Protein backbone atom coordinates (compact mmCIF):
# COMPACT_ATOMS: atom_id res chain seq x y z
CA UNK A 1 0.00 0.00 0.00
CA UNK A 2 1.30 3.44 -0.83
CA UNK A 3 0.83 6.41 1.45
CA UNK A 4 -2.88 7.14 1.81
CA UNK A 5 -4.84 10.32 2.44
CA UNK A 6 -6.80 10.62 5.65
CA UNK A 7 -10.07 10.57 3.66
CA UNK A 8 -10.39 6.78 3.44
CA UNK A 9 -9.25 6.39 7.05
CA UNK A 10 -11.85 8.82 8.34
CA UNK A 11 -14.69 7.26 6.33
CA UNK A 12 -14.06 3.99 8.14
CA UNK A 13 -13.51 5.57 11.56
CA UNK A 14 -16.77 7.54 11.33
CA UNK A 15 -18.72 4.51 10.21
CA UNK A 16 -17.26 2.19 12.84
CA UNK A 17 -16.92 4.71 15.67
CA UNK A 18 -13.24 4.68 16.55
CA UNK A 19 -10.40 7.21 16.46
CA UNK A 20 -7.12 7.10 14.56
CA UNK A 21 -3.93 8.01 16.38
CA UNK A 22 -1.90 10.85 14.92
CA UNK A 23 1.63 10.82 16.28
CA UNK A 24 4.28 13.51 15.88
CA UNK A 25 7.57 12.42 14.35
CA UNK A 26 10.99 14.05 14.50
CA UNK A 27 13.50 11.27 13.86
CA UNK A 28 13.96 7.66 12.78
CA UNK A 29 13.43 6.10 16.19
CA UNK A 30 10.07 7.84 16.67
CA UNK A 31 8.90 6.74 13.22
CA UNK A 32 9.94 3.13 13.78
CA UNK A 33 8.43 2.94 17.27
CA UNK A 34 5.09 4.28 15.98
CA UNK A 35 4.75 2.24 12.79
CA UNK A 36 5.98 -0.98 14.40
CA UNK A 37 3.25 -0.58 17.03
CA UNK A 38 0.59 0.18 14.39
CA UNK A 39 1.68 -2.79 12.28
CA UNK A 40 1.51 -5.17 15.25
CA UNK A 41 -1.98 -3.87 16.00
CA UNK A 42 -3.01 -3.96 12.33
CA UNK A 43 -4.13 -0.34 12.70
CA UNK A 44 -4.21 2.70 10.42
CA UNK A 45 -1.84 5.43 11.55
CA UNK A 46 -1.15 9.10 10.84
CA UNK A 47 2.45 10.32 11.07
CA UNK A 48 2.48 14.06 11.55
CA UNK A 49 5.19 16.62 11.18
CA UNK A 50 5.22 20.14 12.60
CA UNK A 51 7.05 22.99 10.91
CA UNK A 52 9.66 22.86 13.68
CA UNK A 53 10.08 19.13 13.02
CA UNK A 54 10.74 20.01 9.37
CA UNK A 55 13.30 22.59 10.48
CA UNK A 56 14.96 20.00 12.71
CA UNK A 57 14.95 16.84 10.58
CA UNK A 58 14.59 18.35 7.07
CA UNK A 59 11.67 17.45 4.84
CA UNK A 60 13.63 15.18 2.53
CA UNK A 61 14.84 12.95 5.36
CA UNK A 62 11.37 12.79 6.89
CA UNK A 63 9.70 11.87 3.59
CA UNK A 64 12.28 9.20 2.76
CA UNK A 65 12.00 7.63 6.21
CA UNK A 66 8.21 7.61 6.00
CA UNK A 67 8.44 6.00 2.56
CA UNK A 68 10.70 3.33 4.08
CA UNK A 69 8.08 2.73 6.78
CA UNK A 70 5.40 2.31 4.11
CA UNK A 71 7.55 -0.21 2.21
CA UNK A 72 8.22 -2.16 5.39
CA UNK A 73 4.57 -2.23 6.41
CA UNK A 74 2.55 -2.59 3.21
CA UNK A 75 -0.52 -3.94 5.01
CA UNK A 76 -1.45 -0.91 7.09
CA UNK A 77 -2.64 2.49 5.84
CA UNK A 78 -0.14 5.24 6.69
CA UNK A 79 -0.78 8.97 6.10
CA UNK A 80 1.84 11.72 6.25
CA UNK A 81 0.34 14.93 7.56
CA UNK A 82 1.55 18.49 8.23
CA UNK A 83 0.69 19.42 11.83
CA UNK A 84 -0.22 23.06 12.60
CA UNK A 85 0.72 24.42 9.19
CA UNK A 86 1.32 28.12 9.95
CA UNK A 87 0.82 29.56 6.43
CA UNK A 88 -0.03 28.76 2.80
CA UNK A 89 3.63 28.47 1.77
CA UNK A 90 4.42 25.72 4.30
CA UNK A 91 1.30 23.78 3.34
CA UNK A 92 2.19 24.11 -0.36
CA UNK A 93 5.76 22.93 0.26
CA UNK A 94 4.46 19.81 2.02
CA UNK A 95 1.91 19.09 -0.71
CA UNK A 96 4.60 19.54 -3.37
CA UNK A 97 6.83 17.11 -1.45
CA UNK A 98 4.27 14.30 -1.34
CA UNK A 99 2.39 14.81 1.94
CA UNK A 100 -1.05 13.21 1.73
CA UNK A 101 -2.69 15.55 4.24
CA UNK A 102 -2.02 19.02 5.65
CA UNK A 103 -3.33 21.07 8.52
CA UNK A 104 -3.69 24.81 8.13
CA UNK A 105 -3.96 26.34 11.56
CA UNK A 106 -5.70 29.67 11.23
CA UNK A 107 -7.02 29.59 14.79
CA UNK A 108 -4.83 32.56 15.73
CA UNK A 109 -6.67 34.74 13.20
CA UNK A 110 -10.18 36.12 13.37
CA UNK A 111 -12.97 34.11 11.76
CA UNK A 112 -12.91 35.78 8.33
CA UNK A 113 -9.11 35.57 8.01
CA UNK A 114 -9.18 31.93 9.11
CA UNK A 115 -11.83 31.19 6.45
CA UNK A 116 -9.83 32.94 3.71
CA UNK A 117 -6.51 31.25 4.56
CA UNK A 118 -8.09 27.82 4.96
CA UNK A 119 -9.98 28.14 1.68
CA UNK A 120 -6.77 29.05 -0.16
CA UNK A 121 -5.03 25.93 1.19
CA UNK A 122 -8.07 23.73 0.49
CA UNK A 123 -8.18 24.88 -3.16
CA UNK A 124 -4.50 24.07 -3.72
CA UNK A 125 -4.59 20.81 -1.74
CA UNK A 126 -7.69 19.44 -3.45
CA UNK A 127 -6.21 20.15 -6.88
CA UNK A 128 -3.40 17.80 -5.78
CA UNK A 129 -5.53 15.10 -4.15
CA UNK A 130 -4.49 16.10 -0.63
CA UNK A 131 -6.87 16.41 2.35
CA UNK A 132 -6.99 19.43 4.67
CA UNK A 133 -7.53 19.74 8.42
CA UNK A 134 -8.46 23.19 9.72
CA UNK A 135 -8.90 24.55 13.25
CA UNK A 136 -11.61 26.65 14.82
CA UNK A 137 -11.52 27.70 18.47
CA UNK A 138 -8.59 28.39 20.79
CA UNK A 139 -6.68 25.55 22.40
CA UNK A 140 -4.98 27.67 25.09
CA UNK A 141 -4.88 26.02 28.50
CA UNK A 142 -7.75 27.22 30.61
CA UNK A 143 -6.30 28.66 33.79
CA UNK A 144 -8.06 28.80 37.12
CA UNK A 145 -8.42 32.56 37.01
CA UNK A 146 -10.10 32.62 33.60
CA UNK A 147 -13.77 33.43 34.09
CA UNK A 148 -16.58 31.43 32.50
CA UNK A 149 -17.32 33.81 29.63
CA UNK A 150 -13.62 34.05 28.72
CA UNK A 151 -13.38 30.25 28.75
CA UNK A 152 -16.53 29.92 26.65
CA UNK A 153 -15.07 32.26 24.05
CA UNK A 154 -12.16 29.84 23.53
CA UNK A 155 -14.29 26.78 22.82
CA UNK A 156 -15.40 26.05 19.28
CA UNK A 157 -18.80 27.53 18.54
CA UNK A 158 -20.98 24.80 16.90
CA UNK A 159 -22.90 27.22 14.67
CA UNK A 160 -19.65 28.85 13.48
CA UNK A 161 -18.18 25.40 12.85
CA UNK A 162 -20.96 24.66 10.37
CA UNK A 163 -20.46 27.95 8.51
CA UNK A 164 -16.68 27.46 8.57
CA UNK A 165 -16.80 23.98 7.04
CA UNK A 166 -19.33 25.03 4.40
CA UNK A 167 -17.33 28.08 3.36
CA UNK A 168 -13.86 26.51 3.36
CA UNK A 169 -14.57 22.96 2.15
CA UNK A 170 -12.04 21.62 4.68
CA UNK A 171 -12.02 17.83 5.09
CA UNK A 172 -11.70 17.66 8.88
CA UNK A 173 -11.92 20.11 11.76
CA UNK A 174 -9.83 20.48 14.91
CA UNK A 175 -11.96 21.77 17.76
CA UNK A 176 -11.39 23.28 21.20
CA UNK A 177 -13.32 21.51 23.97
CA UNK A 178 -10.87 21.86 26.84
CA UNK A 179 -7.61 20.20 25.78
CA UNK A 180 -4.33 22.07 25.42
CA UNK A 181 -0.82 21.30 24.18
CA UNK A 182 2.05 20.17 26.37
CA UNK A 183 2.38 18.45 29.73
CA UNK A 184 0.32 20.88 31.87
CA UNK A 185 -3.28 20.66 30.70
CA UNK A 186 -5.32 20.87 33.89
CA UNK A 187 -4.73 22.36 37.31
CA UNK A 188 -7.69 20.61 38.90
CA UNK A 189 -9.82 17.79 37.59
CA UNK A 190 -9.37 16.83 33.93
CA UNK A 191 -12.57 17.64 32.07
CA UNK A 192 -13.64 17.99 28.45
CA UNK A 193 -16.80 19.67 27.15
CA UNK A 194 -18.54 16.66 25.62
CA UNK A 195 -21.72 18.74 25.45
CA UNK A 196 -20.03 21.06 22.93
CA UNK A 197 -18.68 18.08 20.98
CA UNK A 198 -22.21 16.71 20.72
CA UNK A 199 -23.57 20.02 19.43
CA UNK A 200 -20.76 20.24 16.87
CA UNK A 201 -21.48 16.69 15.67
CA UNK A 202 -25.14 17.61 15.25
CA UNK A 203 -24.23 20.60 13.08
CA UNK A 204 -21.54 18.87 10.98
CA UNK A 205 -22.21 15.13 11.22
CA UNK A 206 -20.15 14.28 8.13
CA UNK A 207 -17.00 16.18 9.07
CA UNK A 208 -14.32 14.18 10.91
CA UNK A 209 -13.44 15.86 14.21
CA UNK A 210 -9.86 16.18 15.47
CA UNK A 211 -8.69 16.45 19.06
CA UNK A 212 -5.36 18.21 19.59
CA UNK A 213 -3.50 18.40 22.86
CA UNK A 214 -4.67 14.90 23.71
CA UNK A 215 -1.72 13.33 25.47
CA UNK A 216 -2.46 11.50 28.69
CA UNK A 217 0.85 12.53 30.28
CA UNK A 218 1.13 8.82 31.06
CA UNK A 219 1.86 8.65 34.82
CA UNK A 220 4.41 5.81 34.51
CA UNK A 221 6.37 7.76 31.91
CA UNK A 222 6.25 10.96 33.91
CA UNK A 223 7.48 9.00 36.95
CA UNK A 224 10.27 7.46 34.87
CA UNK A 225 11.45 10.91 33.76
CA UNK A 226 11.32 12.30 37.28
CA UNK A 227 12.86 9.25 38.96
CA UNK A 228 15.92 9.33 36.71
CA UNK A 229 16.88 12.94 37.15
CA UNK A 230 14.10 14.82 35.38
CA UNK A 231 12.16 17.70 36.89
CA UNK A 232 8.63 17.83 35.51
CA UNK A 233 6.49 18.34 38.59
CA UNK A 234 2.71 18.53 38.58
CA UNK A 235 2.18 17.64 34.92
CA UNK A 236 -1.30 16.40 34.03
CA UNK A 237 -2.97 15.23 30.81
CA UNK A 238 -6.22 13.75 29.53
CA UNK A 239 -6.92 10.37 31.18
CA UNK A 240 -7.41 7.27 29.03
CA UNK A 241 -11.11 6.93 29.97
CA UNK A 242 -11.88 10.44 28.70
CA UNK A 243 -9.98 9.82 25.45
CA UNK A 244 -11.81 6.54 24.99
CA UNK A 245 -15.11 8.34 25.45
CA UNK A 246 -14.01 10.92 22.84
CA UNK A 247 -13.08 8.15 20.39
CA UNK A 248 -16.60 6.69 20.62
CA UNK A 249 -18.35 10.10 20.63
CA UNK A 250 -17.37 11.30 17.18
CA UNK A 251 -13.69 12.22 17.47
CA UNK A 252 -11.91 10.64 14.48
CA UNK A 253 -8.30 11.73 15.02
CA UNK A 254 -6.43 12.05 18.31
CA UNK A 255 -3.11 13.94 18.34
CA UNK A 256 -0.25 12.78 20.53
CA UNK A 257 3.18 14.31 20.89
CA UNK A 258 3.90 14.96 24.57
CA UNK A 259 3.49 11.29 25.60
CA UNK A 260 6.04 10.24 22.98
CA UNK A 261 8.48 12.86 24.24
CA UNK A 262 8.05 11.54 27.77
CA UNK A 263 8.53 7.94 26.57
CA UNK A 264 11.72 8.73 24.66
CA UNK A 265 13.15 10.93 27.41
CA UNK A 266 12.22 8.63 30.31
CA UNK A 267 13.83 5.61 28.65
CA UNK A 268 17.00 7.53 27.78
CA UNK A 269 17.28 8.95 31.29
CA UNK A 270 16.94 5.44 32.71
CA UNK A 271 19.80 4.09 30.58
CA UNK A 272 22.00 7.07 31.44
CA UNK A 273 21.34 6.62 35.16
CA UNK A 274 21.60 2.84 35.35
CA UNK A 275 24.51 2.48 32.94
CA UNK A 276 26.72 5.55 33.25
CA UNK A 277 29.45 3.83 31.28
CA UNK A 278 27.23 3.33 28.20
CA UNK A 279 27.96 5.72 25.36
CA UNK A 280 26.71 3.92 22.27
CA UNK A 281 23.72 6.00 21.05
CA UNK A 282 22.01 2.83 19.82
CA UNK A 283 21.79 1.69 23.42
CA UNK A 284 19.73 4.64 24.64
CA UNK A 285 17.95 5.59 21.40
CA UNK A 286 16.94 1.94 21.05
CA UNK A 287 15.51 1.98 24.57
CA UNK A 288 13.64 5.17 23.67
CA UNK A 289 12.24 3.56 20.52
CA UNK A 290 10.99 0.54 22.55
CA UNK A 291 9.22 2.81 25.04
CA UNK A 292 7.60 4.86 22.23
CA UNK A 293 6.35 1.64 20.67
CA UNK A 294 4.82 0.49 23.98
CA UNK A 295 3.02 3.80 24.52
CA UNK A 296 1.62 3.88 20.96
CA UNK A 297 0.48 0.27 21.13
CA UNK A 298 -1.37 0.95 24.38
CA UNK A 299 -3.19 3.92 22.88
CA UNK A 300 -4.13 2.16 19.66
CA UNK A 301 -5.32 -1.01 21.38
CA UNK A 302 -6.72 0.08 24.73
CA UNK A 303 -7.84 3.67 24.18
CA UNK A 304 -8.58 4.63 20.57
CA UNK A 305 -10.15 1.31 19.53
CA UNK A 306 -8.38 1.12 16.18
CA UNK A 307 -6.66 -2.27 16.42
CA UNK A 308 -7.55 -4.46 13.42
CA UNK A 309 -9.08 -1.49 11.57
CA UNK A 310 -6.35 -1.35 8.87
O1 LIG B 1 1.12 20.72 18.65
C1 LIG B 1 2.34 20.83 18.51
C2 LIG B 1 3.18 19.63 18.49
O2 LIG B 1 3.34 19.10 19.77
C3 LIG B 1 4.48 19.90 17.79
O3 LIG B 1 5.35 20.61 18.57
O4 LIG B 1 6.22 22.45 17.11
O5 LIG B 1 7.56 21.60 19.08
O6 LIG B 1 7.28 20.21 17.01
P1 LIG B 1 6.66 21.27 17.92
P1 LIG C 1 0.02 16.93 23.11
O1 LIG C 1 0.94 18.03 23.51
O2 LIG C 1 -1.08 16.75 24.10
O3 LIG C 1 0.73 15.64 22.84
O4 LIG C 1 -0.71 17.37 21.74
C1 LIG C 1 -0.07 17.17 20.52
C2 LIG C 1 -0.76 17.85 19.39
O5 LIG C 1 -1.88 18.33 19.49
C3 LIG C 1 -0.04 17.93 18.12
O6 LIG C 1 -0.74 18.67 17.17
ZN1 LIG D 1 -1.87 20.26 18.07
Image: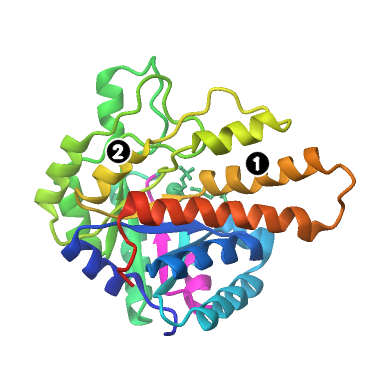
Residue 162 versus residue 309 in the image, above or below: above
Q: List the residue tagged with mark 1.
A: 266
Q: Quadrant of the C terminus?
A: bottom left
Seen from this angle, which residue lies furthest top? 145
Q: Which segment is the magenta one?
A: 90-107
Q: Is residue 27 visible?
A: no
Q: How is the image coloured?
A: rainbow
User: Which residue is at the far left?
Assistant: 202
Disc 2 on helix, strand or loop? helix
| In front of the other: 144 or 126 | 144
* Quadrant of the rendered image containing residue 66: bottom right
Relative to the observer, which residue lies in front, 187 or 222? 222
Report whether 229 appears left or right of 47. Answer: right
Q: Which residue is mark 2?
A: 242
Q: Is mark 1 within 8 Å of ligand 2?
A: no
Q: Secondary structure at mark 1?
A: helix
The structure residue drawn at horizontal position 44% and vertical position 79%, both measured from the top left corner, is 3
Residue found farthest to the front: 274
**Residue at 30% from the left image edge and 24% from the top image edge:** 150
- Give residue 234's position: percent from left, percent from top: 53, 22
Q: Residues within 10 Å of mark 1 (few under 14, many from 20)?
A: many
Which image quadrant for residue 285?
bottom right
Is residue 16 a member of the stretch shown in magenta? no
**In this orientation, which residue lies closer to the viewer: 238 or 153?**
238
Give the side of residue 170 with respect to residue 288, left or right: left
* Disc with the residue nearer the chain's start (2 vs 1): 2
Give the x, y percent position of residue 167.
20, 60
Q: Residue at x 41, y 80 (%)?
A: 75
Amino acid sequence: MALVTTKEMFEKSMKENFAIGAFNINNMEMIQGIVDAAAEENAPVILQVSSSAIKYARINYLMKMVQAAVEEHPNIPIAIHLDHGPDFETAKMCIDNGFTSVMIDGSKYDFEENVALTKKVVDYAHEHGVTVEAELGKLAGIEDDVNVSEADAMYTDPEQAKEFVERTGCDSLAIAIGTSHGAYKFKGEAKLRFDILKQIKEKIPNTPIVLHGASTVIPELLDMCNKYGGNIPGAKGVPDEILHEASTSGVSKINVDTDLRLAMTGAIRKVFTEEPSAFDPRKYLGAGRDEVKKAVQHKIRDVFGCSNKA
